[in-house]
């Protein structure tokens, strides 16, 4: 079987969720494919993306996924006679395809929060907003595939609830990157709850406000806000800081190694998000042996299990109390052990085999 893996969503500056999913799943699929009789080639649009793929990987360079030609991509790919194409997104054009197709929709979050990523061209942002005004365009897009992939059972259940597609849905889970490999030799995770680490954007539904308000009840501790932030949004959040409470530190962007080091230093991963597609930072923390305090909602329960303590997303006092619960070594050790066991169910190798299994179920001979 010949598979084309769409790797055009790999970012070459810093990874977002789709980019990391692409990189990790591509590497695992490339490793697992030969034993399954699958030949894999990767679609890229930027030569720099090649560096993020396995050494010696076969690549085909085509247009960017934001190009106006994207709706007609299948007509181009037909020339390469693939048996199947997998995309980690759902926007690749299917018109006139002569191959099996798996499209991916990670979640339905943009139907509830329609603001598109700011790095997209204006015409793509406009189309994004129009696309998400109803489920009809999404249904049309997904039903052009043979199979729809998603990253969690929570998302799959939501697809079924809103009748998003008539196609079979397969869960190809996200999995954590191995942050432990980024720690310097001899550096190990130091347990504690002195540092609260938040990795994520500052969009409204991420509800960072609750985390900052919680610091009023956590004097002597530090909340580390790791991601890049605009000056206006930072000023807005700084007005919420209680000087008598814990310290709030804006890092305005960190490397993966810095992220790992902060989590390893007597830390708790925190998120008061009111909506999530997956919650990859939670998975990464658990894999490192770090507990989490997060909003009580289904996706976080799926990702973290008993490896986290849960609080209502808008209850700052409850978040503070949960962090203080982790000061008890026995309680903290139990949460960490549960998290390590739970997150062990997720791996990129397992996800790659799920993808390869799905390929075998695609219709043949289009």
Image (cartoon, rainbow, N blue to C red):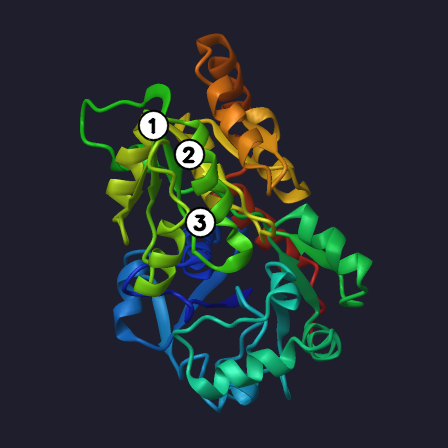
Point out the image quarter for the C terminus: bottom right
Q: Position of residue 209 (x, y in %)?
A: 48, 48
Q: Earlier in the sequence, mark 1 or mark 3?
A: 3
Residue under the image location 35 percent in, 64 percent down: 232
Q: How far apart, in angstroms, are the residues tagged by discs 1 and 2?
A: 8 Å
Query: Residue visible at 40% across and 52% down?
Result: 237
> Looking at the image, is 330 positioned above or below residue 213?
above
Asked which secondary structure carries label 2, the reply is: helix
Q: Earlier in the sequence, mark 1 or mark 2?
A: 2
User: Residue at position x 70%, y 59% from top?
Assistant: 361
Identify the residue under disc 2. 215
Separation of marks 1 and 3 at Cα, in angstroms: 39 Å
Residue extending furthest toward the left: 185
Label 3 residue SS: helix
How far across and how far down the image is residue 236, in percent?
Answer: 39, 57
Residue of label 1 = 221
Taking depth in this image into account, of 45 and 155 the one nearest to the observer is 155
Disc 3 to disc 2, C-alpha distance:
40 Å
Residue in the foreground of this view, choosing between 154 and 5: 154
Pointers 1 and 2 in contact (CB under 8 A)? yes
Considering only vertical position in the picture, is 152 above or below 167? Answer: above
Q: Can you see residue 30?
A: yes
* Residue indicated by mark 3: 28
């Amino acid at each position: 079987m010949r598979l084309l893996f769409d790797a055009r969503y790999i970012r070459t500056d810093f990874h977002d969720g789709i980019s990391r999913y692409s990189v990790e799943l591509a590497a695992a699929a490339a490793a697992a494919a030969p034993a399954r009789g699958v030949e894999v080639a990767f679609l890229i649009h930027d030569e720099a993306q090649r560096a993020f793929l396995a050494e010696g990987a076969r690549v085909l360079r085509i247009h960017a996924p934001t190009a106006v030609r994207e709706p007609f991509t299948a007509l181009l790919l037909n020339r390469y006679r693939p048996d199947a194409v997998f995309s980690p997104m759902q926007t690749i054009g299917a018109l006139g395809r002569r191959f099996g197709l798996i499209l991916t929709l990670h979640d339905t979050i943009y139907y509830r929060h329609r603001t598109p990523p700011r790095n997209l061209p204006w015409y793509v942002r406009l189309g994004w907003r129009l696309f998400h005004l109803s489920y009809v365009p999404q249904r049309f897009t997904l039903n052009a595939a043979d199979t729809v992939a998603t990253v969690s059972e929570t998302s799959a259940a939501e697809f079924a609830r809103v009748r998003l597609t008539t196609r079979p849905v397969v869960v190809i889970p996200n999995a954590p990157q191995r942050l432990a490999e980024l720690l310097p030799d001899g550096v190990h995770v130091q347990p504690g709850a002195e540092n609260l680490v938040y990795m994520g954007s500052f969009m409204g539904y991420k509800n960072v406000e609750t985390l900052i308000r919680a610091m009023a009840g956590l004097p002597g501790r530090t909340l580390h806000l790791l991601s890049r932030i605009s000056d206006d949004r930072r000023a807005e959040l700084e007005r919420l800081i209680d000087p008598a409470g814990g310290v709030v530190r804006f890092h305005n962007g960190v490397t993966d190694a810095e992220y790992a080091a902060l989590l390893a230093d007597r830390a708790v991963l925190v998120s008061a998000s009111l909506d999530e597609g997956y919650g990859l930072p939670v998975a990464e923390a658990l894999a490192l042996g770090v507990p989490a305090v997060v909003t009580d909602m289904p996706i976080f329960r799926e990702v973290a299990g008993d490896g986290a303590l849960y609080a209502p997303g808008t209850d700052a006092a409850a978040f503070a109390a949960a962090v203080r619960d982790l000061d008890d070594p026995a309680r903290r050790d139990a949460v960490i052990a549960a998290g390590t066991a739970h997150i062990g169910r997720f791996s990129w190798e397992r996800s790659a085999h799920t993808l390869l299994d799905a390929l075998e179920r695609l219709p043949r001979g289009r």
